[in-house]
């Protein structure tokens, strides 16, 4: 296809091209479109597919030109990619299309290009491995968390305090000062489930007592129309339940899991925290290595890839619609860093032939199966059903890449 291609602007990962398709090529495309129409039409007085082109053009001119335009744009796009050696990173954008009768077709093509990453330096870096020691306080905190999960709520006949679970009947006066019928709620005091002013009223009452007090709504209340307003609140405290923690003894350890004693539970908790500390230290080393490689080998990334990563975060965190614009602004830098990290890992994996093989995947599945005392086939089927085989493949590839990087660099 004859084309005239002029680079209008090329910056970062984007190419902006001006394209001109000669009038002769446009006329040929219109003739082909007209013939395609003619073969499908049934016009009075003519056999199927035998209507003269002039009549077909007269009756279906706009539709023929639209079909010709779409055909020309698609063909031109393929030609541009091949001629300019472009690997697109996302959907192209066509703008400023001029398609006048008897004239050349001109348009602008905006396309993001997959970055060509050359990691000239991936070795010779020195990074510090900061492995944080596990303290007795951390072990105690984790055990207390286990106790809290198995706590019982016991009714008490006294004023509530932070941490208590209360049942209340609550009503808030409307703009006219009228008090509606109360609604019943369960609230853990101090957990941020009610505004502070309402909690203060609740903690003034004894079970069965009804109080009415003016309450000021916080200045940072989510509903902007209610911020700073003072309204009458009526609270009836129905009942109070206080959390009773189980004794920290051998019986508790046996209830938590297969532990003979509280010492055995503490030992397992410490070992688990040690494993987490090792993983955190390793993750920090990995990120520092990637950051050093990116600093030594700068490259542009397509904006659309960052947008896709932000959207993935929005989906994963189930961000409400009204919060998404703010979230996009705050998380864009995080998403850009993740895209660069993924590209570095992918590039090294390809260059050093470190991509996960089928045997690597089988070995990892067998490892998981042995740990869970089940059959590898069942583990694989479960991963496949959940759509996580690709995730497992990426994890193995990443481990192999960082294993290679550890050999090429100094970790202190």
Image: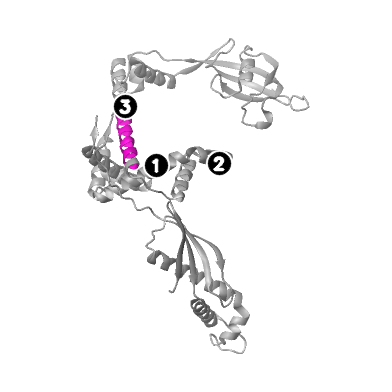
Measure how far apart labels 2 and 1 are at the Cα level.
19 Å
Judged by depth in the image, the label closer to the viewer, 2 or 3, is: 2
Indicate the quadrant where residue 233 lies.
top right
Judged by depth in the image, the label closer to the viewer, 3 or 1, is: 1
Quarter of the picture holding the C terminus: top left
> Where is mark 3, residue-wise?
277
Asked whether residue 284 is drawn in magenta, I would say yes
| Viewer-side residue, 79 vs 272 | 79
Few, some or many C-alpha atoms within 10 Å of disc 2 (few <14, some 14-19, many ≥20)? Answer: few
* 2 and 1 marks in contact (CB < 8 Å): no
User: Considering the numbered disc 2 on the image, is that residue within a helix, a strand or a loop?
Assistant: helix
> Where is mark 1, residue-wise?
338
Give the mark, 2 or 1, whose residue is nearer the N terminus. Answer: 2
Please state the horizontal and vertical placement of residue 58, each as a whole percent of the image.
62, 82
> In the image, is residue 386 above or below residue 266?
below
Give the mark, 3 or 1, whose residue is nearer the N terminus. Answer: 3
> Where is mark 2, residue-wise?
325
Count of number-bearing discs: 3
Indicate the quadrant where residue 325 lies.
top right
Residue range in magenta is 277-294
User: Considering the numbered disc 3 on the image, is that residue within a helix, a strand or a loop?
Assistant: helix
Give the mark, 2 or 3, whose residue is nearer the N terminus. Answer: 3
> In the image, is residue 322 above or below residue 17?
above
Q: Residue at x 48, y 38 (%)?
A: 331
């Amino acid at each position: 296809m004859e084309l005239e291609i002029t680079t209008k602007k090329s910056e970062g990962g984007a190419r902006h091209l001006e394209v001109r398709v000669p009038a002769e090529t446009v006329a040929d495309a219109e003739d082909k479109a007209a013939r395609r129409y003619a073969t499908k039409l049934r016009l009075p007085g003519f056999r199927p597919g035998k209507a003269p082109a002039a009549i077909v053009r007269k009756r279906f001119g706009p539709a023929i030109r639209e079909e010709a335009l779409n055909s020309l744009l698609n063909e031109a796009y393929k030609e541009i990619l091949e001629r300019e050696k472009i690997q697109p990173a996302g959907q192209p954008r066509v703008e400023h299309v001029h398609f006048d009768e008897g004239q050349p077709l001109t348009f602008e093509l905006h396309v993001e290009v997959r970055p060509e990453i050359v990691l000239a330096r991936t070795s010779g870096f020195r990074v510090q491995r900061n492995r944080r020691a596990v303290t007795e306080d951390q072990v105690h905190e984790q055990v207390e968390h286990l106790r809290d999960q198995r706590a019982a709520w016991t009714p008490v006949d006294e004023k509530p305090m932070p941490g208590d679970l209360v049942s209340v009947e609550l009503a808030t006066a409307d703009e006219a000062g009228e008090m509606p019928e109360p609604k019943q709620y369960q609230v853990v005091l101090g957990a941020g489930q009610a505004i502070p002013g309402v909690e203060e009223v609740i903690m003034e009452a004894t079970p069965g007592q009804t109080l009415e007090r003016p309450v000021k709504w916080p200045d940072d209340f989510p509903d902007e129309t209610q911020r700073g307003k003072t309204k009458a609140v009526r609270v009836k405290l129905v009942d109070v339940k206080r959390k009773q923690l189980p004794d920290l003894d051998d019986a508790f350890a046996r209830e938590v899991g297969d532990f003979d004693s509280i010492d055995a539970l503490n030992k397992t908790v410490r070992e688990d925290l040690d494993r987490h500390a090792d993983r955190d230290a390793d993750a920090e080393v990995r990120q520092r290595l990637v950051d050093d490689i990116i600093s030594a080998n700068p490259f542009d990334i397509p904006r659309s890839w960052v947008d896709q990563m932000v959207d993935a975060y929005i989906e994963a965190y189930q961000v409400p619609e009204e919060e998404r614009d703010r979230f996009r602004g705050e998380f864009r830098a995080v998403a850009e860093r993740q895209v660069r990290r993924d590209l570095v890992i992918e590039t090294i994996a390809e260059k050093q032939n470190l991509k996960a093989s089928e045997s690597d995947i089988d070995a990892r599945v067998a490892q998981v199966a042995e740990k869970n005392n089940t059959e590898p086939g069942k583990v694989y089927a479960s991963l496949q059903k959940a759509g996580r085989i690709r995730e497992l493949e990426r994890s193995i590839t990443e481990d192999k890449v960082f294993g290679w990087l550890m050999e090429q660099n100094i970790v202190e």
